[in-house]
Structures are given as structure tokens and as C-alpha cells.
Amino acid sequence: MSNIDGYEQVFIYLNPEEVAFCKSLSERIDAENKKAGVIDKFSAIKETPESKKAMMFRGFIGEMAFSKYAGVPMDKTTKPRGGGHDMMVGFLSVDVKTSVWRGLAIQKDKKARPSDIYVAVSCPPGREHSPEILGCVAAEFAFDPRNRKEEGPQDENPFYLIENKHITHLKRRS
């Protein structure tokens, strides 16, 4: 953990076995999704199959990191799923959003069935062993038009981009 201008950075260390598990899980779910005909309509249309796999892997890295931080189990099933919540923390449903940049993007269709909390995790390529949990935002705040702007492929599936100043930063757990 380091401190930059009063903001405590929360990095979660993932050991090689955990990183390998996330890689294996992403490959198994990708195969199950293909077999079941589940299509990720929010991955950029121009992405290659390799970059979509990397995006899925990065997502599981973020879920693993937050599950370790929160002390709750990660969903390790390989059943095809399209959307929904990643885990429960107490009575709150949580959706972990992992990206290579330091921000939070939420698909617009999440507004129809929102999670209670959206967690932002940053995991640039090569940093899979130490993703950074940026913080979280409540759904009612995330979907309030005053707190976000639309980003992404505007023609089909835009995202809501939550600015970092609106993300509640988390503290390092002891």
C-alpha cells in the first residue's frame, strides 16, 4: 500500500496459483459460453478473440482480488452467465468492474437489474499478480445522470463512465 495525496492505494497480492486459477477459469467459462451460445455483447466489436479472452481473464483477476479484500467467496462456477452480480457482501450484491485504466465503466443495461455496489479494479497487462482496488460506488449514485457521462460505442452499447472523483476509495484491511 502506498499513499498519494491522502489517497491510500489498495493493492491485493495474488499468488501464482491464484493467477493461474483465474486464467483457467476464464478459459473454461469462455468454452462453456461458446457451447451455450452466450455472447458478450459489450466487448468492443473490433476486439480480437485474444483480447476478449484477456478481458475475461482480467475480470476474474479483479473478482479474485476483491473477494480476498472483502473476505467473501468468489463465484468459481463455469455455468454460462450473462450479466448479474459477481458476489454478495452481507446483504449487498456486488459487481466488480476491472479495466486496464484507473476508472469505472458500467454497461448501460446494468441499470435494468443493478447490483447494489460497483467496485472498480485496475489491472494493467503484466500486473495480474497485484491488481489495485480503486474503490466503489453505489448503484443509485452510478446511474444518476449528474454523476456520470456516456462513453463507449455509442451506436450499440454505450457505457456509463464514473469519474474517479465520484468513487469512494477503500481502506486497506488489517
Image (cartoon, rainbow, N blue to C red):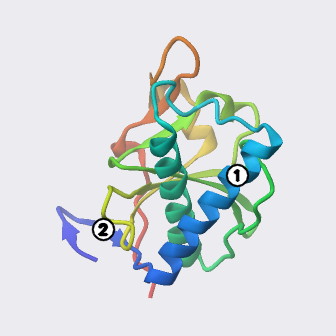
Whole-angstrom CA distance, mark 1 to mark 2, is: 35 Å
Residue 143, compared with residue 31, is above or below; it is: above
- Residue at 58% across, 16% down: 156
Amino acid type for the residue under numbered disc 1: Ala
Mark 1, mark 2: which one is toward the viewer?
Answer: 1
Return the x and y of residue 120 as percentages of the image width and height.
Answer: 46, 53
> Mark 2 — residue?
9
The x, y position of residue 134, in whole percent, is 39, 58
Vertical side of 157 occupied by 129: above or below:
below
Q: Position of residue 98 (x, y in %)?
A: 47, 52
Q: Is residue 26 left or right of residue 35?
A: left
Q: Is residue 103 left or right of residue 139?
A: left
Q: Is residue 69 visible?
A: no
x, y percentage for residue 115?
A: 69, 48
Q: Is residue 141 left or right of residue 14?
A: right
Give the residue drawn at x 52%, y 78%. 18
Residue 165 in view in this figure: yes
The disc label shown at residue 31, or none: 1
Circle 1: element type: helix
Of the residues under marks 1 and 2, which one precedes in the sequence? 2
* x 61%, y 80%: residue: 71
Front residue of 8 and 86: 86
The three-letter amino acid code for the residue at tag 2 is Gln
Using the image, determine if residue 72 lies above or below residue 57: below
The image shows residue 71, relative to residue 123, as above or below, that is below
